[in-house]
Image (cartoon, rainbow, N blue to C red):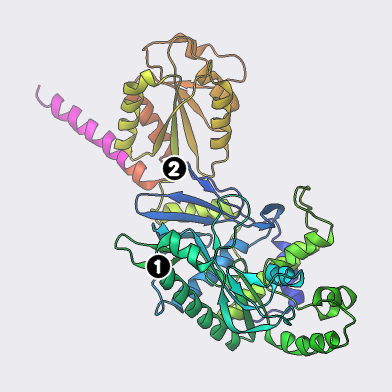
Amino acid sequence: MGHVMTESDTKSKIRQHLGYTLDDCLLPELGRVKKGKVRDIYMTDKNVFMVASDRVSAFDYVLPNLIPFKGQLLNKITRWAFENTSDIIPNALVTDDADPNVVIQKKMKNLNVECIVRGYLWGSMAAAYEKGERTFCGLPVQNGLLRFQQFPTPIFTPTTKAEVGHDENMTYQEVEALIGKDLAQQAKDISLKLFARGQELAAKRGLVLIDTKYEFGTDESGKLHVIDEVNTPDSSRLCDAKELETKWPQIVEAMKGGQYKDVSELLAARPELKVKEFSKQYVRDVLLEQGFKPGKAVPTLTEEQVVECVYRYINVFERITGQTFEFPASPLTPPKRLLMNLVSKKLIKGCCVGIFAGSDSDMPHLQKIQDNLTKFGVPSHIRICSAHKQPSKLEQALEYYNRSIEPMLIVGCAGGTDALSGTASYHSVFPVVSCPPDGWNESCLKNPPGSSNAYCLRPDNVAKFAAQTFSFINDEIRSTLQKGIAEKIVKLEKADNLY
């Protein structure tokens, strides 16, 4: 471990890095992105490519603020947890060495069950308990418990994994009906084992793992793997063991007199008894204190609240793993760093061409362009958007690509009166080149002011134009380009030697 910084020093350092954040991270060459609340996910042939952003969500809403380093800290904790639980269950990790915010996992068949394990009456369960509920996920819970009280043994309370909206509680029988008895039993048993290991490791660091959730998937042979996060502050609740040991007896004593109907009422009167959590609960509490209710605009956190949130993530990372968080020395912004790292590791090319056409009848022409791009190793996508018939769709597609953190080239392929390339070059932040499918087409050259498209008549020429555009980004593309030029010169010299 390096030099241990004080809380004041750490917070001062955080303030210097408030702009060091990763939000939208579009990498078009990987295909269509599945944008989650905090992750951008790409499905490749065999793997799941996950970019952990610095977005933060609460109550199923994404906050306006970004939390510096949040994504990479969660990745670091998961990596550490994977290493310390591999004897219990294999994990889906392929690599997380490319960039701090990127994790690549094997593609699995997701069980679509949130496997939640609770060691204490806490959070939403405590709120429901205080309102009189005594059955959770089909499990009866005894009377007389208090918020923050430890269960005799941890309980398994699974929920659905909702794409949108809230997850819904499931009974164990419903889990069996969804995934089968054998997988359901495995998921439950392994969840409890992972939780026990997590509690054991946390206790060694003076922490209490209160509750958590796990996700599982199966490989081609049906073998169960743990996927996604493990015991991170976003998927778990943790607190300081000494604080809980100090405050819990005081809570029990205060509740004996019958003055308060429940612990929530006690905490309203004596907020100093509230147990500080290392989780997203801090963000939830801040929103509630500002009067947030679902359906209302999500409040913006103050600078001090963002600093406190970052500090808690760093603190829990260091306490859980025993490692020291190193603030970045590089002046590169996270998006530029991420792009550079992925290209250098040869995980992506670092560029992409969007081939736009106004009609699918031009597909042979588009395919020729794509085939020639493939020869240079340049990734590409074909998009059908008519500037005349689908102007809003074309603009939406261009706005989507404008979010790309990797450089792009837009190729416009429209016959007749070409409004596509003019519209594209007006709206795109990337260069546009026209390659009309109907041969020489002067309309490509007569676009109005503000339209800046270039022109290449032949599919092979537009492909070389793209390769030249991206040769400074990717060494493989540059090498292929140079090799082609050299081979052509040799061919000409041989031809000349015949005479």
Q: What element does badge 2 sit on?
A: loop
* Left/right of residue 373 with respect to residue 67 in the rendered view: left
Give the position of the N terminus as an image quadrant.
bottom right
Residue most extreme to the left: 498
In front here: 204 or 10?
A: 204
Badge 2 or badge 1: first in the primary sequence: 2
Distance from disc 2 to disc 1, alpha carbons, whole Å, reads 36 Å
How would you classify the magenta stretch by its main secondary structure? helix
Say which mark, if any, is on residue 52. Answer: none
Q: Which residues are magenta?
A: 480-499
Please, is residue 176 above or below residue 85 in the view? above
Report if residue 486 lies within the magenta region.
yes
Look at label 1 and name its amino acid.
Lys
Residue under label 1: 181
Whether residue 98 is visible, yes or no, is no
Question: Residue 5: which quarter of the image?
Answer: bottom right
